[in-house]
Amino acid sequence: MNVVDLFAGMGGIKLGFERNGFKAVFSNDIDANCKKTFDSNFTNSLQKEGLTLKSITEVSSDSLPGFDLLTGGFTDEERGDLFFEIIRILRDKKPRAFLLENVKNLKIHDKGNTLALIYKELESIGHFVKDVVLNTLDYGNLPQNRERIYIVGFLSKKEAKKFVFPEKIKLTKTIQDCLIKGKVANKYYYNGKPLYEKIKDDVTKYGTVYQWRRKYVRENKSNACPTLTANMGTGGHNVPIIKDEFGIRKLMPRECANFQGFPQDYQLPNIADSQLYKQLGNSVSVPVIERIAYEMKRVLYA
């Protein structure tokens, strides 16, 4: 089955679905740096131009190839405002199903009225809708505390009824499993830099992830990394901090990719770290998407 992947970013949703046999035939985003990352990994015969660098407002329904399923991770305020463009494409093209991903707070935003409006709009064009908040820690076998809302819909009431979200799984991966072994580039270490004196007495344990909260250090005691966020790209202090045998440093982009479940052969291009951090914070946890895609496949291929 073919998938149209909106707000594709670095392709995390596409990767999760293609691992289940779906084929993405169109992906878009407005970030030129995302295109560099996406195209380093995904350009193929179905998407010869790689990521389409275009706002969803510029994507006409008629220009899209035929597809069976729509996905979209609109995770910031700007993309949230573009929800009605998703409705437009769903209404015009009538795919069998969709998956939308957003921040957990969508569930309670405006006392639940925002989510109620989303349901109303999706149901008005014939979809039967379900949602759930899943934590990567519990559903992706990744040591990252990341809660997101996932909204699925089907044109068939029967298929919607049969669909179930994944069940919890035991966490077996550790923080250490996601870290690069040995000494990394000096630019990631705080040793000898102004922040070092403020954090050196608090960042003391190996295998623990810390955060600098402007005035104090916060130790994450759940044996997990805190939620990776897009604002990691707006300043080094926003990036989670660890202690290794060579000193105190921030997570590298490759390590953030590991915490999001991207495979080791996934290529991070030679662009500014700030842009990679931003993309990884905006991305999805691939194994969670993969498990949802599996359940959707189970229903759609029945």
Image (spheres, rainbow, N blue to C red):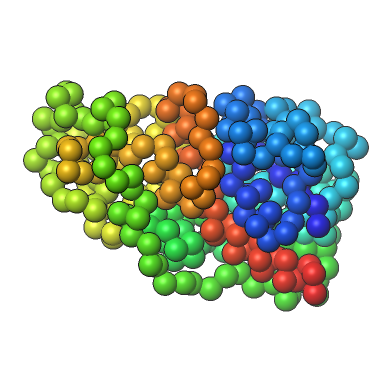
Q: Quadrant of residue 217?
A: top left
User: Looking at the picture, how far across and down is residue 197, in whole percent?
Assistant: 11, 30
Q: Position of residue 20 (x, y in %)?
A: 68, 61
Q: Is residue 104 above or below residue 276?
A: below
Give the left or right position of residue 27, taking residue 77 as reference. right
Q: Relative to residue 295, is residue 4 drawn left or right?
A: right
Q: Give x and y (percent) for residue 292.
A: 62, 63
What residue lies at 16% left-to-right and 29% top-to-bottom? 191
Quadrant location of the C terminus? bottom right
Q: Is residue 41 above or below residue 137?
A: above
Give the residue at x 66% y 48%. 14
Q: Which residue is situated farthest in the right direction here?
A: 62
The quadrant the N terminus occupies is bottom right
- For the point 33% across and 34% down, the residue is 238
Q: Is residue 81 visible?
A: no
Q: Residue at x 28, y 60 (%)?
A: 222
Residue 183 seen in render: yes
